[in-house]
Image (cartoon, rainbow, N blue to C red):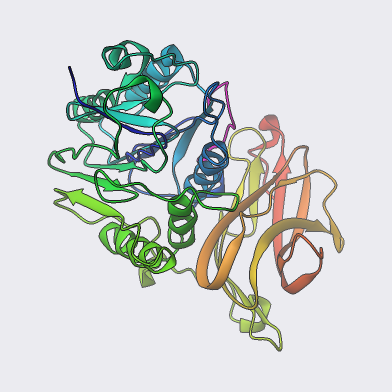
Amino acid sequence: MKRLIIAPFLVLFIFYPIFPQDRGLNVSSQNSSPHSEKRVALVIGNSAYKDMPLLNPVNDARDIAYALAELGFEVIHKDNLTRTEIINAIRAFGERINKAEVALFYYAGHGMQVDGRNWLIPVEANVSHEYEVEYESVDAGRVMDTMQDAKSRLNIVILDACRNNPFARSFRSANRGLAVMNAPTGTIIAYATAPGAVASDGDKKNGLYTQELLKVMRIPDLKIEELFKKVRISIQNKTAGKQIPWESSSLIGDFFFLRNTTAEKTEIATDEKSVTATNDAGDRLEIISIDPPSPSVIPIGISQDVVVKVAYELRSTNQCRIWVQPIIDNTLHPNGNWQPSLAIQNGKGIIIRSFGLDAPGQVDHIRVMMGSDSTKMALVSLMKEVRYYFVGKSSSNQNH
């Protein structure tokens, strides 16, 4: 009889540029600054299990997808997939990541281990005996093989095996956790907890591991190894040592989700007050760079977005959001296309947002605001004068 270990929640990260697809939330890298490296990500969240549904995986996958899009990844995001749909998503992912510099695969949902092999559990899985696992599930090794075949420079796999075995009553063995996987050259494999142990699902919107991961992904100039170390320290403290995330790495290069080097900084104006704003509580916003520079003519449907990199410091509250909006004649543009950031945590960081217009028109200012969803009040805001002309394709060669 094969030995089986099940971990209901499995999260996999592999760095590759990813594209949106039909099921789940579609996001792209339009909110991100340009990167010289090709980044693709496949993000899957499975919650709607018949026998043992999960609360957080769909939320985790959605928030990770948005964060990755902000950080320059092309993202394919899928929710509540069957076995065939997981295989098809991995296959499509493989087509996108050919020779990518960075590939990322994220899976949140039930997972299990049989004889040292880790399996992703589809939402419709019906397993009564251990031998049925390989026929009802998807081998995590399929993702690893896809990454290696694509010859990407850097791969990251994150396995979050944090809940009890959903099929425990059907099996003679009821071991917990996931099996240790060897990391091929250029790969880092991160576990939400030590192999064979159980991780916390958390009592908020996100699982504990993803919650802490989201907090540190936007910290500039943080190497991936240091990022996981911060997550490990935070979770160890929050769980009084009951959960200790763990990694296996064979990386031969450095990776940063976000860089903030001197070369990347672009001075927007000589008047410092025009790009920086603070309040009495110490909250602060600063526009670091805008792309394309002002003035510019932007053809709608070709290069629609203006990308704005904003540095922030939040002191007065635990979390808030940041808005970057197009303004015309001191009013929010009626044809503006923009979205607020995900919730940001107390502290310092850098966030990248973008906006566009859905119809031809002019933008004469950019407004950046930091505020709370609950109060709808701005903690601090700033305005930057610009000249952007959004035109139809046929008008893109006009001079202004």
Q: Is residue 271 visible?
A: no
Q: Tell me the quarter of the picture where residue 275 sits.
A: bottom right
Q: Is residue 81 visible?
A: yes
Q: Quadrant of the N terminus?
A: top left
Q: Which residues are magenta?
A: 21-29
Residue 84 image position (x, y, % from top left): 42, 12
Q: In the drawing, does residue 153 fall left or right of residue 332?
A: left
Residue 397 image position (x, y, % from top left): 63, 38
Residue 70 image position (x, y, % from top left): 52, 50
Task: Say which residue appears at 18% left-offset and 20% top-offset.
Answer: 2
Is residue 321 or residue 355 the one in the foreground?
321
Task: Say which residue appears at 32% left-offset and 22% top-offset.
Answer: 171
Taken as a whole, is the magenta stretch helix, strand or loop?
loop
Residue 290 image position (x, y, % from top left): 57, 60
- Above or below, 263 against 340 in this view is below
Is residue 133 or residue 317 the one in the foreground?
133
Asked if the stretch drawn in magenta spans residue 333, the answer is: no
Q: In the drawing, does residue 102 fall left or right of residue 251?
A: right
Is residue 84 or residue 333 the one in the foreground?
84
